[in-house]
Amino acid sequence: MFLAAHKREQILPQPVVLISTKDENEICNIAPWSNITSILRPLDEIVLASWIKRDTLENIRETQEFVVNIPSTNMIEEVMTCSKNYPPQVDEFECSKLKVHASKEIKAPGIEGCLAWAECKLVEEIKREKYSLIIGKVVSLEVNDNFFNEDGDMDYEKAKPLSIMLGNKGMWFTHPVFTGKYNEYSEMFIEQKDKDPNL
Ligand SMILES: Cc1cc2nc3c(=O)[nH]c(=O)nc-3n(C[C@H](O)[C@H](O)[C@H](O)COP(=O)(O)O)c2cc1C
């Protein structure tokens, strides 16, 4: 069987994050996002794709900052509330009943109860006809101590970070499970050939 190329999200689980921003008038916006990834570990940049008609994109352009909040599977209802296209003058903390988690380095607030908060500053916007790619630098990465050990490793079974798969009729939510297989990073580097001397 072959699928239409635009259905590629049906073959690949995507992360679900909540992006929180503030506009010039201090009105807060929250929106779920799946087209987001880190740019090559251990660097500190991320990239997300945004349709052009998004309050989130407008706010990032206005204020140059945003928070990537990592929700747990117990926040699906709030995630779907924030996915509704409220007008920009609506404060989405109020309609979702989510609470503010104060940011440390930027003005846009994070969301209380999330598993982690990546405060980001805009580095570059790459404009295409129908969407933009937003590259952000992570200026503060805070995790919720209830779900992480002292080394900074997440307890996935407890945290249940949210992922999504798309089907023909809608979306279904999932979360990662441990396969029982573990490997060291060092197994990848035969001759240290891609080691960056500056890191
Ligand atoms: C799980 C999920 C993932 C989403 N991912 C994206 C995305 O990657 N990019 C995007 O432009 N919209 C995405 N959306 C749609 C926006 O969240 C939705 O249009 C929202 O109303 C935008 O809000 P805003 O206009 O306040 O920014 C996603 C929606 C859901 C439910």
Image (cartoon, rainbow, N blue to C red):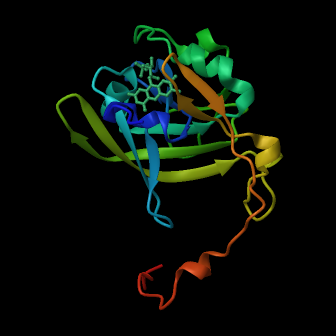
Q: Pick whichever, 21 or 190, lies toward us.
A: 190
Would residue 189 be visible to someone looking at this image?
Answer: yes
Q: Is 56 situated above or below 67?
A: above
* Residue at left offset 50%, top offset 42%: 12
43 left or right of 118? left
Image quadrant of ligand 1 equals: top left
Q: Is 57 situated above or below 197?
A: above
- In the rendered image, the quadrant that contains the N terminus is top left
Residue farthest bottom in this picture: 191
Which quadrant of the view contains residue 102? top right
* Residue at left offset 51%, top offset 16%: 169
Q: Pick whichever, 16 or 46, lies toward us.
A: 16
Relative image position of residue 34 (x, y in whole percent): 48, 35
147 left or right of 132? right
* Residue at left offset 47%, top offset 17%: 27
Relative image position of residue 109 (x, y in whole percent): 56, 32
Number of numbered labels in the structure image: 0
Q: Is 192 situated above or below 80?
A: below
Relative image position of residue 77 (x, y in whole percent): 67, 17
Relative image position of residue 24 (x, y in whole percent): 37, 23
Residue farthest left in this picture: 129
Residue farthest front in this picture: 1
Would residue 99 be visible to someone looking at this image?
Answer: no
Q: Pick whichever, 68 or 179, lies toward us.
A: 179
Q: Is 18 situated above or below 97?
A: below
Which quadrant of the view contains residue 40? bottom left
Q: Pick whichever, 72 or 164, lies toward us.
A: 164
* Residue at left offset 41%, top offset 8%: 87
